[in-house]
């Protein structure tokens, strides 16, 4: 897997599935250079849901995870597996979040 200067591999073995899902969704979205709005459009989900998933604020439903997986071409099990991704808190457009 490719990594960029903003993403390096890391062991998250003590993380919850919710945290791993958050990292994977954020990582994949950044790799595709999609905004949260674009991912929401591609999944038929709300921007606030995508944001909550990426921030590990909520436990996503299986249906939501399936929809996100379809958008990325990943299975639900791939989205909830630790791939060792790390994502910095940079926006897709390159601006720092406050």
Image (tube, rainbow, N blue to C red):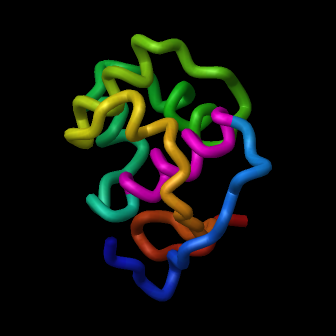
Q: Position of residue 88 (x, y in %)?
A: 61, 71
Kindly identify the residue that appears in the image at 54 percent across and 78 percent down: 8
Q: Position of residue 72 (x, y in %)?
A: 26, 42
Give the left or right position of residue 55, taking residue 79 as reference.
right
Is residue 13 shown above or below 40? below
Residue nearer the viewer, 56 or 39: 56
Q: Position of residue 51 (x, y in %)?
A: 57, 38
Q: Which residues are magenta?
A: 17-29
Q: Position of residue 29 (x, y in %)?
A: 37, 53
Kindly identify the residue that appears in the image at 33 percent across and 39 percent down: 39
Kindly identify the residue that appears in the image at 51 percent across and 65 percent down: 91
Residue 69 is a magenta residue: no
Residue nearer the viewer, 80 or 92: 80
Q: Residue furthest right?
A: 14
Is residue 59 shown above or below 52? above
- In the picture, the quarter occupied by the N terminus is bottom left
Kindly identify the residue that appears in the image at 47 percent across and 31 percent down: 47
- The quadrant where residue 27 appears: bottom left
- In the picture, the quarter occupied by the C terminus is bottom right
Is residue 21 shown above or below 58? below
Residue 23 is a magenta residue: yes
Q: Residue furthest front?
A: 13
Give the left or right position of residue 90, taking residue 94 as reference.
right
Does the magenta stretch mainly form a helix, a strand or a loop? helix
**What is the count of numbered marks?**
0
């Amino acid at each position: 897997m490719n990594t960029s200067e903003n993403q390096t591999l890391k062991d998250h073995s003590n993380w919850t599935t919710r945290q791993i899902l958050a990292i994977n969704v954020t990582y994949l979205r950044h790799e595709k250079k999609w905004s949260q709005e674009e991912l929401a459009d591609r999944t038929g989900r709300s921007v606030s849901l995508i944001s909550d998933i990426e921030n590990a604020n909520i436990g996503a439903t299986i249906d939501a995870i399936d929809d996100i997986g379809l958008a990325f071409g990943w299975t639900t099990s791939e989205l909830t597996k630790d791939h060792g991704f790390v994502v910095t808190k940079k926006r897709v457009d390159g601006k720092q979040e406050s």
